[in-house]
């Protein structure tokens, strides 16, 4: 096999290229995202109009919300954000599986009686619940089987109020497949007819541990994001993985070959907006991530957050770029040019007032190009416009 590197002049947006992708999205490019949380949910729904080959490498380290209860009782990775992304990529048309989509998105009422909710769940296992009865076989049998495994191992004190049925299906499948997440993610994505691939960066039940400039340490993703507790008031200086959520226990995590091959197959790699440390940087912690990225000569794009991210306390936009590069460089194995890890940074200076603008000349010193293009619309502000952002990224492929 002979590899050659070809450069071309790109236009943003490249209308002809976008029209070609939209006509045959099943042959669209492979855009890979290091992501987590819900920041790309709407964007993913837009992207699947142009390509069914996007790859979403996600962090399974969430320790708050409904994921916390499942993680506590079953010592498993967090699956709530993963379910949400799978559903964002699902075929929501009549050619997909609308009844299963509705079931996977259903949540038990928050104010329900736990005893009654257990009876409802039992009716789903038995196939008597209306939401299950609308799902055709053999899908219904597969779903009932995963829920059966969940019910059989559900602790007596497990609280079903507000529980997502999709999360329970994934948890049951995780238990059914001997605590391996990949098989149930594959099955779930096939059942939902997803137009893209969702994969966890690691399948271990790990937790995030950060050290702040003040000397304080925090263990647990939900204590870092500023969403469930007060935001941090000191700059993050390091983030690591822990095998325990009680005390910090360092763990050596290596990138799996399956994930490395996905990175190698990408036509574009994107470091997208979202919680900077717990969604983006956390994905880069396993050993081998930076090396896999460096060996792929595709474009690599960083899209800074708009507005205020509590995790980026005390950081300028340039600090964020250099922090991203720093974690990418870890464990590469040899010194590589920075532009093998990051080529482009997207901004929209016309529609966004940045608190600390990036310097085009400073980025050039590192071989990084600043692309200033329209990414925010009147309707989307203060967030990125999903259509504009997808158009900009697709135009580089």
Image (spheres, rainbow, N blue to C red):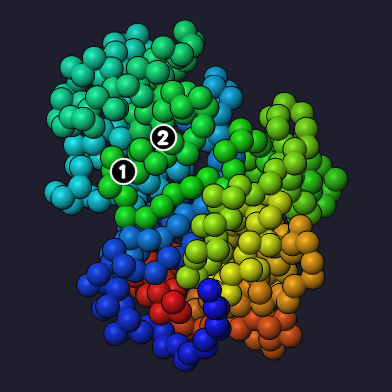
Q: Residue furthest front?
A: 1
Residue 147 vertical placement versus 251 (above, below): above
Q: Residue furthest right?
A: 215
| Residue 106 x %, y % | 29, 32
Q: The residue tagged with tag 1: helix, strand or loop?
A: helix
Q: Residue furthest bottom?
A: 9
Q: Say few, some or many: other residues with alpha carbon within 10 Å of mark 1 (under 14 / 14 to 19 / 20 or more).
A: some
| Residue 241 x %, y % | 71, 41
Q: Which residue is mark 1?
A: 190
Residue at screen point 45% across, 43% down: 82
Q: Quadrant of the C terminus?
A: bottom left
Query: Left or right of 363: which side holds 299?
Result: left
Query: Left or right of 28: which side holds 171?
Result: right
Disc 2 and disc 1: Cα gap in Å? 10 Å
Residue 36 vertical placement versus 172 (above, below): below
Residue at screen point 35% across, 17% down: 148
Residue at screen point 28% across, 47% down: 193
| Residue 20 x %, y % | 27, 78
Query: Left or right of 59: which side holds 142?
Result: left
Q: Are marks 2 and 1 in contact (CB under 8 Å)?
A: no
Q: The residue tagged with tag 2: helix, strand or loop?
A: helix
Q: Is residue 58 visible?
A: no
Q: How many numbered marks appear?
A: 2
First of labels 2, 1 by sequence position = 2
């Amino acid at each position: 096999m002979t590899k050659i590197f070809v450069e071309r002049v790109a236009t943003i947006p490249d209308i002809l290229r976008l029209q070609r992708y939209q006509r045959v999205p099943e042959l669209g490019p492979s855009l890979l995202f290091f992501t987590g949380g819900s920041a790309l949910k709407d964007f993913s729904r837009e992207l699947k109009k142009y390509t069914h080959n996007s790859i979403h490498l996600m962090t399974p380290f969430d320790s708050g919300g409904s994921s916390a209860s499942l993680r506590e009782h079953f010592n498993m990775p967090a699956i709530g954000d993963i379910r949400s992304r799978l559903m964002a990529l699902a075929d929501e048309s009549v050619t997909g599986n609308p009844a299963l989509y509705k079931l996977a998105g259903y949540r038990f009422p928050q104010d329900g009686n736990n005893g009654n909710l257990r009876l409802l769940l039992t009716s789903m296992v038995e196939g008597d619940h209306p939401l299950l009865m609308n799902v055709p076989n053999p899908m219904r049998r597969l779903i009932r089987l995963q829920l059966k495994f969940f019910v059989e191992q559900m602790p007596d004190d497990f609280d079903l109020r507000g529980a997502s049925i999709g999360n329970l299906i994934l948890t049951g499948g995780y238990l059914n497949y001997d605590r391996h997440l990949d098989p149930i993610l594959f099955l779930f994505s096939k059942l939902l007819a997803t137009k893209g691939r969702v994969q966890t960066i690691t399948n271990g039940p790990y937790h995030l541990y950060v050290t702040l400039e003040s000397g304080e340490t925090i263990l647990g993703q939900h204590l870092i994001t500023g969403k469930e507790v007060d935001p941090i008031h000191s700059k993050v200086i390091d983030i690591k993985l822990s095998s325990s959520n009680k005390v910090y226990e360092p763990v050596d995590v290596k990138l799996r070959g399956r994930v490395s091959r996905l990175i190698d197959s990408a036509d574009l790699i994107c470091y997208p907006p979202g919680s900077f440390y717990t969604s983006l940087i956390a994905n880069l912690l396993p050993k081998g991530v930076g090396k896999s990225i460096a060996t792929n000569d595709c474009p690599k794009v960083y899209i800074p957050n708009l507005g205020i991210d509590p995790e980026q306390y005390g950081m300028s936009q340039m600090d964020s770029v250099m922090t991203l590069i720093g974690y990418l460089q870890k464990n590469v194995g040899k010194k590589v040019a920075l532009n093998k890890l990051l080529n482009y940074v997207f901004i929209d200076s016309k529609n966004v007032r940045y608190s600390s603008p990036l310097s085009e000349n400073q980025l050039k010193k590192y071989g990084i190009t600043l692309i200033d293009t329209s990414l925010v619309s009147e309707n989307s502000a203060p967030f990125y416009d999903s259509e504009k952002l997808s158009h900009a990224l697709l135009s580089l492929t």
